[in-house]
Amino acid sequence: MIDFSLNDEQKALQEMAREFALKEMRPNAARYDKGDAAPDEVMRKAFEAGFLTCNIPAEYGGGGLGNLDTAIISEELAWGCAGMFTSMMACSLALTPILLFGTDEQKKKFFAPFVREKNFAAFCLTEREAGSDAGATKTRALREGDHYVINGSKCFITNGGISSLYVVFALTDPDKGIRGVSAIVVPRDSPGIVIGKEEDKLGHRASNTVEMTFEDVRVPAGNLLAKEGMGFIVAMKTLDKTRASVGAAGVGIARAALEHAVEYAKTRIQFGKPIALLQNTAFQVAQMAMEVNAARHLVWHAAWLMDQGKPCGKESAMAKCFGSDVAMKTTVEALQIFGGYGYMKDYPMEKLMRDAKLLQIYEGTNEIQRLVISREVIGPIK
Ligand code: COS
């Protein structure tokens, strides 16, 4: 039987996240969108509310929430401010490899600071020459006794400048290409980590994005996740799990744009009546509402599959791709309903549109999602 209703706990989580988004994120969104200050205070409150640690299992002191629970919360937080949400999501993205592949000892050690106080983590996969082609990593991690020595550069690292811990993907065996990549946990206080200048982005300006260089960074060999050479699989399995959250963020942004457009269309009088009564506007609203709903169902389905421990790579890619495309399309159309006002910074539409764009790019471009989906749908060709 299929049950689309949320249970009481999920309804309470949704309500709590919506309240947080409304009271803490929305009133501060425009201020942090300027990008000249970090939303530390909002993040402190987000930590206290448990949003930064909700995916850490309860046995390690976290919220122990499931993937569907997290998707419900993600929609609300992105509805509040996609930029601040990105910082939170990037932190859970970086903790996911530890969650999936860490030993009990590693989980205890690495999760402890995150449940104790506000901390961020960063997922360091992308390089200048290894974006969509994530396996083309050039960063090296050479074994020297009981340590790895890491050298190389990573770019577009969300939370890079504010994190206490990094999960770094680097070649431990350069001759083996993709099968020579390993995933290594690197604490921020390791000497040799150089944080580059903060990127000046189109949207998600409340989040921190930097280039990072690792210069002879020595970390204990015990910080290796899984086995040497398994790093690419670690990255792929992590992204299979986290991409649905990007879809959830897309739903949150699109829903916000739709709600603003409906409110505006009901009060904006042109040709003697509210523009909501014009059939073009009404049909646009209907289309947006259908797509937001469809995107949410894809997200919830992918998250539900994860909670059942079932394969979800294709469904997670669908949720990410469709959810972010819907966010982009809906924000463009909702801005159009606002006409000239939509283009002004006094109204929320232009930020929503700028924020929507990144969802089509990060955690794998939507072209990569289509590649992942089509490979599975088409299957092997003899
Ligand atoms: N789960 C488990 N294993 C996987 C996997 C998955 N989701 N995806 C790939 N693999 C395995 C493959 O089975 C293959 O193993 P074998 O060689 O033993 O058969 C290996 O990994 C290499 O896979 P593949 O041949 O598919 O690699 P490609 O180089 O073609 O790249 C894509 C695959 C394009 C899907 C990958 O590079 C990718 O996701 N790129 C986008 C990266 C990204 O999202 N970046 C964002 C950074 S985080 S903000």
Image (cartoon, rainbow, N blue to C red):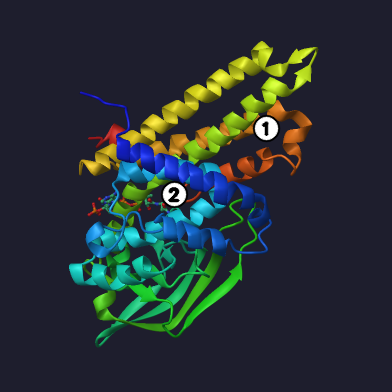
Specify which label sits upstream in the sequence, 2 or 1. Answer: 1
Give the answer, above or below, for where 160 lies relative to 326.
Answer: below
Q: Quadrant of the C terminus?
A: top left
**Percent of width and height locating residue 284:** 60, 20
SS assignment at label 1:
helix
Whole-angstrom CA distance, mark 2 to mark 1, is 26 Å
**Percent of width and height locating residue 334:** 64, 29
Q: Which residue is mark 1?
A: 335
Q: Quadrant of residue 12?
A: top left
Residue occupying the far right of the picture: 271
Identified at 36% across, 72% down, the residue is: 113
Identified at 51% across, 69% down, the residue is: 162
Give the answer, above or below, for where 99 lies relative to 360.
Answer: below
Mark 2 residue CB less than 8 A from any atom of ligand 1: yes
Identified at 50% across, 75% down, the residue is: 213
Amino acid type at circle 2 is Gly
Q: Is residue 201 left or right of residue 225?
A: right
Can residue 374 be seen at all in this image of the molecule? Answer: no
Q: Which residue is mark 2?
A: 364
SS assignment at label 2:
loop
Amino acid type at circle 1 is Leu
Residue occupying the far bottom of the picture: 145
Can residue 118 be seen at all in this image of the molecule? Answer: yes
